[in-house]
Amino acid sequence: MAIVCKSSAEIAKMRQSGRIVRQVLEHVRRLVTPGVTTMDLERAAAKQIEEAGAKPAFKGYYDYPCVLCTSINQEIVHGIPSEKRVLKAGDIVSIDCGVVLDGYYGDAAITVPVGEEITPELRKLLQVTEASLYRGIAAARVGNTVGDVGAAVQELVEANGFSVVREFVGHGIGTRLHEEPQVPNFGTRGHGARLREGMVLAIEPMVNSGKPGTRLLNDKWTAVTEDGSYSAHFEHCVAVTKNGPLILTQ
Ligand code: MF3
Ligand code: CO
């Protein structure tokens, strides 16, 4: 499958799904507090997606059971919401949400601290991961390559002593949740597919405070750091336009 470029009318539709994803994430972010379970977050998100007239993108995707992925501490991505997972002060939790509206997908993620106090190391992990996302976005320009995006993310992360996950990557997005190209959070400038007007990329750095290695839990979904270090994840959908990168999940 080739990389599908979107018309401005399609990008306008993707802004609508992106807006709903953002509203869900902002709503869920406010609920994150010690004592809340990840299933509480799931229920709130499911309700809000439905009220917005959209459909969840993750539920049923390869039999994934929920509308959110909620990944705590050493969990990198694809943590499954559960009544048994109670957030506690000092944790970090990644919340990843996707929706489809009128045939077009939106996908975004944030990682948030639980309670007011997290360690300075975790504070830095969140800041660097989010900043690396914006470095990647800034590289999503006509004429640049997918490798330029990955390199921009990787350079900032590694300059701060953290590492980027290799086994999971960002992706094209549009009328499917995952389209070509794959968008790794590492790479070499000038390498990979050339970016053209109308491409839409889900850029999603997954950053470990320790080594980059990953391992899958027995639930077959939850990816965790191999070395038990912490991991953060931020994601936006970004259209490549002639006026530069346009964030659709704003
Ligand atoms: N943002 C993630 C991704 O693009 C979430 C997918 S979860 C899944 O891969 F359940 F849908 F697979
Ligand atoms: Co994604």
Image (cartoon, grey):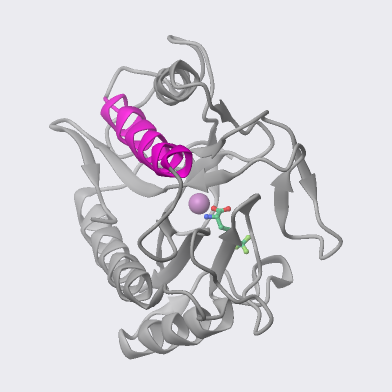
Asked if 60 appears above or below 18 in the picture, the reply is: below
Classify the position of ligand 1 by quadrant: top left, top right, bottom left or bottom right. bottom right
In this rendered view, identify the residue nearer to me: 63 or 223: 223
Q: Position of residue 104 (x, y in %)?
A: 38, 64
Of all residues shown, which one is farthest toward the left?
Answer: 243
Report if residue 144 lies within the magenta region: no
Q: Quadrant of the C terminus?
A: bottom left
Residue 151 horizontal side relative to residue 5, left or right: right
Residue 221 horizontal side relative to residue 236, left or right: right
Q: Position of residue 132 (x, y in %)?
A: 38, 31
In this rendered view, identify the residue nearer to me: 25 or 172: 25
For the question of whether residue 170 can be seen, the reply is yes
Q: Main secondary structure of the magenta part?
A: helix
Residue found 13% across the figure and 32% down from its top: 243
Asked if 79 appears above or below 63 in the picture, the reply is: above
Asked if 191 appears above or below 37 in the picture, the reply is: above
Of all residues shown, which one is farthest toward the right?
Answer: 218
Report if residue 125 lies within the magenta region: yes
* First to last magenta residue range: 120-141
Q: Position of residue 74 (x, y in %)?
A: 65, 49
Residue 239 horizontal side relative to residue 148, left or right: left
Residue 156 found in image quarter? top left
Residue 64 horizontal side relative to residue 120, left or right: right
Residue 242 found in image quarter? top left
